[in-house]
Structure formats: structure tokens, C-alpha cells
Image (cartoon, rainbow, N blue to C red):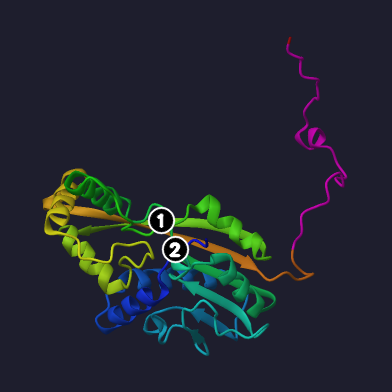
Amino acid sequence: MTAPPLTDTAALARQRARAARAPALFLHEMIADELQDRLAEVNRTFTEPAIVTAFPQVWQGRMPQVRMVAEAEVLDLAPESHDLVLHVLGLHWANDPVGQIIQCARALRPDGLFIAALFGGQTLHELRAALAQAESDVTGGLSPRVLPMGEIRDLGGLLQRAGLALPVADSQTQRVSYRDAFHLMRDLRAMGETNALSARLRRFTGRAVMGRAAALYADHFPEPEGRIRATFETVFLTGWKPHDSQQKPLRPGSAAARLADALNAREGILPQGD
């Protein structure tokens, strides 16, 4: 029996469309700023970029001649048609993240650049803990409520699996202050980031669970003036389409000089244990 996919893509599309009508995209704006800063540090002029995003309005006026590509399981990207592909805040929902990166890699010309920005494992850990404890206290059970996002050590390996060269993974953490848990959840709704898990409950959560979660959140993750904090970890994955001009690691055993000579150090034999 085949396991159901992690994400209900139809539900996610509905949530993205609903969020687009009255969005709260400050995190998208911050990440767009960060990506532009990173691109400015690359000694390259990109002439045919593409951006995979559910919110193209964030990129209006930011990058000339950019092609916007909608989130989808099969991306509208032609082979070797772009010198830059950005995948922005959608990869954490993908049922096949490696497949998404492979599609982006195929769309790159040799020596083209791929960058993904996605939410990482520390994102909303406070909300996850409060909801889990509240549901356990009130109902005696647990249900999937917050997307289980990947850790940076695992996400970095996706680049190599997709065949990209010079892979780099790094992360940034943003802590945001909210009036209360309900204010946070309204923002998540306006970001299109509420629960779209295939295994989610298909009924409304009772007031007792939500009230208990809000109280636990305020007790365990307080901020000054009676507010609460929410953590958003953004993981950035960077890789290049392979090309002969790129740096390559030396073949093992091909070194022309000894490390001890370079360090001006004496070599010795370590004593063997008993």
C-alpha cells in the first residue's frame, strides 16, 4: 500500500490563493532582499533568470527580464533555458524536493546558478510544542498540525543528489514578536503557510485546544510587554550546473608537497595502545 504524500497540494494551492487576496509577505520581502544581496556578491550578470514562487508580486521591479514560474509538481521550465533559477519559499512543501531541484538544474545552462530558500527545522518550533502539549492535555492524542521541515544537514545533501556542483547550505534565523498565538496564526494564514498536510484533521480544532495552546505559548515563549516570540529559520541551498571551468577537488594522492613541510613541523609515529 502506497503511503499518502506529505502535502495535500490542492489544499496548499487553495491556501496560497486565499493568502494572495490579503497577503502578509514580510518574510518573503526579507528573503527577496537577502537573495538580491547574495546575487550582488556573485561576479556574474544573469540575463535570463527564472523564479519559482507562489507570490510573484514580491519580485515586481526587483529583477529585470525575470520569468515567473508557478509552484507545481511539474515546473514550467524548459531544459537549459536559464542562467539563474531561484526557488523561493516553496521547497519545504514539496512532496519530492529532490525532483524539484532536478527540474531546476535541468533548466540551467552549464555554469548556471541555482538558489533555493526554504523554511528549516527550527521554524515555528514554539507553535509546534504548544499545539502538541495542548492537544495531548485536552484530547489525550496528537494530530499533524505543523509541517515537519528539514534540518540543514539533511537539506544540503539534496543539491548533490540533484547533480549540482559546488553545493553550499547555510541558514538564517529570524525571531518575530506577536501579540499572541492567534495573531501569529492569522499571519501564517496570510502567508499561505497554514496546515496543508495530507494527514491533517479534516475538522475544526475545538476552542479548548486552541485556548490551551495560546496559554502554553504565552507561558513558555514570552517576550516583553506580554507578547510571544516565533522563530523562522530560512535555509539557503546554492549549487551550480556543472561546467569544465569550475573548480574541482584534487584527486586523492595527487598532492605535490607534504603537509608537515608546509607547517614546518616534525612528523612522528603515534604510540600504539595496549
- The quarter of the picture where residue 101 lies is bottom right
Left or right: 62 in relation to 21: right
- Rendered view: 53 above or below 179: below
For label 1, the residue is 148
- Rendered view: 43 above or below 252: below
Which residues, given as a range, are shown in magenta?
A: 247-273
> Total marks drawn?
2
**Position in image of residue 214 (x %, y %):** 16, 53
- Rendered view: 62 above or below 243: below
Left or right: 59 in relation to 226: right
Q: Nearer the viewer, residue 138 or 145?
A: 138
Of the residues shown, which amino acid type is indicated by label 2?
Leu
Q: Which mark is residue 6?
A: 2
Secondary structure of the magenta portion, mostly? loop
**Position in image of residue 118 (x %, y %):** 45, 64
**Position in image of residue 176 (x %, y %):** 27, 59
**Position in image of residue 149 (x %, y %):** 43, 57
Q: Which mark is residue 93?
A: none
Q: Nearer the viewer, residue 172 or 181?
A: 181
